[in-house]
Amino acid sequence: MTTAETSEQGQEAAGGRQAKIVALVVAVSFFMQILDGTIVATSLPQMAASFSVQPVSMSIGITVYMLTMAAFIPLSGWLGDRFGARRVFLTSIGVFTVASLFCAFSGSLAEFVLWRAVQGAGSALMTPVGRIIVLKNARKSELVQAIALITWPALTAPVIGPVLGGFITTYASWHWNFLINIPIGILGMGLVLRFVPEQRESDPGRLDILGFILSAAGLTFLLAALELSVKWEGGLLPVMAMLAAGIVLSFLATRHFLAVDNPLLDLSAFRVQTFSMSTLSAGTACRTAINATPFLLPLLFQLGFGLSSIAAGAYLLVYFLGNLGMKTVTTPLLRFFGFRTVLVLNGLIAAFSIVACGFLSPDTPQFFIHALLFVAGLSRSMEFTALNTLSFADIGPAQRSSASTLSSMLQQVSMLLGVAVAAAVLNISSALRGADNPVLADFRWAFVVVGAIGVASSLRFLQLPAEAGAEVSGRGKFRRN
């Protein structure tokens, strides 16, 4: 081996380490953000007592956070290009952390809602800009590992958040559910300053104000309709009105982006098959099915099995361990089988494991429940990592900012859509029985419907070429060796 080859390999190794470090730094902030979104719900009754309001009134704290985040997500890509991704990412962590501190010391519901809105604005910029940073620092051969690192917060935080939140609320106070963000946020900002290089576009262009208004309003109305459908407040008319408004505004935003010279969001990424399938069509349906599971499982164990929140949390920890267990084999499996095979076969395993959860009962042997939850966690982790990596496998540098923003927008929709579909099936099944609360039979229908969506979406990936994303997965290189 020549000196030049040795030097080149050394530079590649150093670049690979840098990409992993940057991904880990981004993952720390993602974990704080997603944990906050799942941990707060456990303390709403205690917060209501502290603010001297009814517990149902506290849901506005979650709603305003979600809607503010939806409003600012479309702006994230342009801000990253205009002011530098590192600077915007650092600012988003700072805003989120400071808002968490003020949420913890809020003395009234109005004050709490104000700071939750500020939190949502910081959160809106964090995910898409953080992903842009990772994409700019990782070569295609490093993309699988980098995406896997920033995907694990989305897999683990929703599972451990309710358990941790319940523990904190029971043995400390609800304030600590927000104060826990302070050291994580400070650590995240320090790591960004130390390890993340500054990168910005030379000419991001002027802000497309009309495009921002249309896309922000469209996404906000869509998510508000889904959120309202889950809570089933106010009847069907407000849900349908918001859904119609969201669809119309999203259509107008799309037409605007296709017509102007310098749009806020470059929709050309949807012409890339791997991005379109893994985010818009099959990817959204697949995420919808998988995202319904963390919502359904705690309800199944508490309402269907009659378990306490702590006992239900113990089952969810097994699901969490399954998410972690897949990380070490994700890259080898993608290299050996390729994206198409993994997305189809693993997607079917994930879908059928969801269906199987619907047939669990208090009489099911505990070992079988643990084994099923572990498999469901494994397949969930694999599917999300494969989807998130394939999304950017063929995206060019000029499309990264818009593609990351579009991906974040669609993932927000799929998260709420999964909960909305599951909740709708539970409500319909319960209503047909003339009952107020769901029982095991209702959960069975919910898991079967959600699993069927997962099966259909997995089979859609058969339309991908056999070598889709091979440059990223390294499949061709593996086969040649």
Image: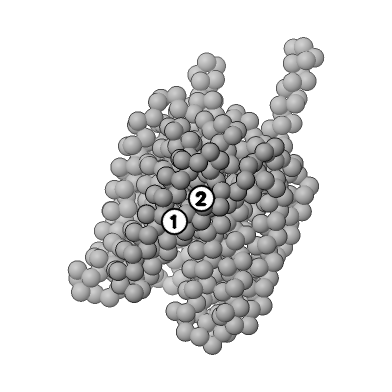
Judge the density around disc 1: few (<14), some (14-19), many (≥20) Cα neighbours within 10 Å. many
Instruction: Return the residue nearer the eye: 52 or 202.
Output: 202
312 on left or right of 92: left
**Badge 2: residue crowd in 10 Å (few <14, some 14–19, many ≥20):** many
Which residue was labeled with disc 2? Answer: 211
Name the secondary structure under disc 1: helix
Q: Residue at x 46, y 71 (%)?
A: 309
Please name the residue shown 34% across and 74% down the image.
Answer: 234
Q: Which residue is mark 1?
A: 218
- How far across and how far down the image is residue 249, in percent? 41, 55
Residue 144 percent location from the top left of the image: 56, 35
Identity of the residue drawn at 34% across and 59% down: 244
Give the residue at x 61% y 78%.
Answer: 111
Image quarter of residue 205: top right
- Tell me whether the residue at label 1 lies in contact with that at label 2, contact meaning CB atoms closer than 8 angstroms: no
- Colour scheme shown: one colour
Name the amino acid type tagged 1.
Answer: Gly
| Mark 1 or mark 2, earlier in chain | 2
Q: Is residue 298 left or right of residue 425?
A: right
Q: Is residue 477 above or below residue 393?
A: above
Amino acid type indicated by mark 2: Gly
Rounded to the nearest angstrom, the CA distance separating label 1 from label 2 is: 10 Å
Query: In which quadrant will I find the C terminus?
Result: top right
Q: Quadrant of residue 101?
A: bottom right
Q: Quadrant of the N terminus?
A: top right
